[in-house]
Amino acid sequence: MFKFLKLLGLNEWLWQETGIIDHGKRAKFLGTQPVRALTHVTIHFFQNTNVDFFNEIVKLVEQGKLNNQLDLQYGEVPIENPKGGYRTPKIVNATRTIQLHETFLSYQWCITYAIYTLYVETIDFPKINAELGYTAKNITPEKIRKAKEVFDYAKYIIRYFDTWDKDELPNPEKYSATERDYIEQTNIFYTEGMKFILCHELAHAKKHLDNLPDEACQSCFQEIEIEADKEAIENIMLGSGQERKIIAEVGIVMGILSMIFFRSTTTGKKHPNVEDRLTIALEIMQTRDDSYAWAFACVGLELWDTQFELNFNWNNKGKVTYKELYYEIVNQIKAIHN
């Protein structure tokens, strides 16, 4: 089938090895931000989280627990709303509609790209070279610099909006074919992270909106947030299989990390601490000690540490496993809060 499509000249970008891949030229997308190139794919993967998932969505719609349309909002505005709150994913109780904003999707892609690229360039490639005893993988300072620039852009659009420069910054709509591995691997982890976020909101529709706790009971709200995480993880793992488990693990880590870069503390009133959500998720997934999901989590926490100058002690990096390092850093986060 793929050879047949190639002969017809369809989807030529799939085999493109040089030049610029520009999805904006081959298709019309809603929205103005480069992440628009992945919106339809993200929704497709969410609807097909596992073999029974779409039928569950239909059932919830029929029961009146879920609106049959996503409220996908567009506009060149920051994630922080000047009227209060953030334009982050949520389910609106009155309409039972899952709401997403294009700027948040841009932010999520950018933090995913930054963490993935820094993992490859500062952890994975050096490890491979050290094990082999020679430079099998060239480390590229320019890629590290660009990853940090993309992360800076993600931080910026939390409170201010600026155009995502498709010619200067890595993005999923327009990119060099020689850089496609970094972009398209990011796309995989990004869509998996958004799947987790959407599954979390759907869990609220299924289990919580009909029986919300009293506003004064903050711990009650924290409990339902953890329950929604568990429900989302269960649904994703049902559709992952052993061969895709690592993709699911990293995606879920990315989905949970999405809220940590908004402020210097992880504590919340109605939401559990981000590090608690992260730890619970990693343990529920029975993440193997050697899974690079632990390293991805550490890269994200180190970016947050640098962002707010929290001055965690990273001296054990490279001396212990990333699972051990992760728990060391979590203990330091707890020390800040206590």
Image (cartoon, rainbow, N blue to C red):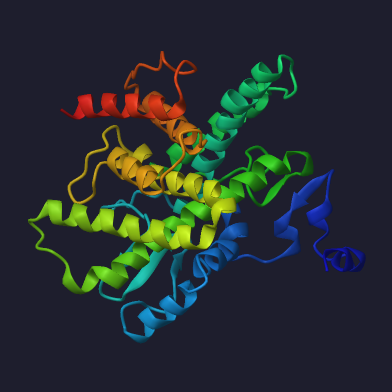
**Residue at 74% of width from left, 53% of height from top?**
22
Work out whether residue 90 can be spotted. yes
- Which of the image's four quarters has the C terminus? top left
Nearest the eye: 47 or 39: 47
Residue 225 position, x and y percent, is 26, 55
Work out whether residue 83 can be spotted. no
Residue 100 position, x and y percent, is 42, 61
Nearest the eye: 217 or 250: 250
Residue placed furthest toward the right:
7
Q: What number of labels is visible? A: 0
- Which of the image's four quarters has the N terminus? bottom right
Residue 155 position, x and y percent, is 43, 37
Nearest the eye: 47 or 258: 47
Q: Specify whether 167 is left or right of 61.
A: right
- Corner quadrant of residue 276: top left
Q: Specify whether 218 is left or right of 70.
A: left
60 lies above or below 259: below
335 lies above or below 297: above
Q: Specify whether 24 is left or right of 163.
A: right
Residue placed furthest toward the bottom:
62
173 lies above or below 304: below
Residue 95 position, x and y percent, is 30, 76
**Residue at 46% of width from left, 66% of height from top?**
72
179 lies above or below 72: above
- Corner quadrant of residue 170: top right
- Corner quadrant of residue 166: top right
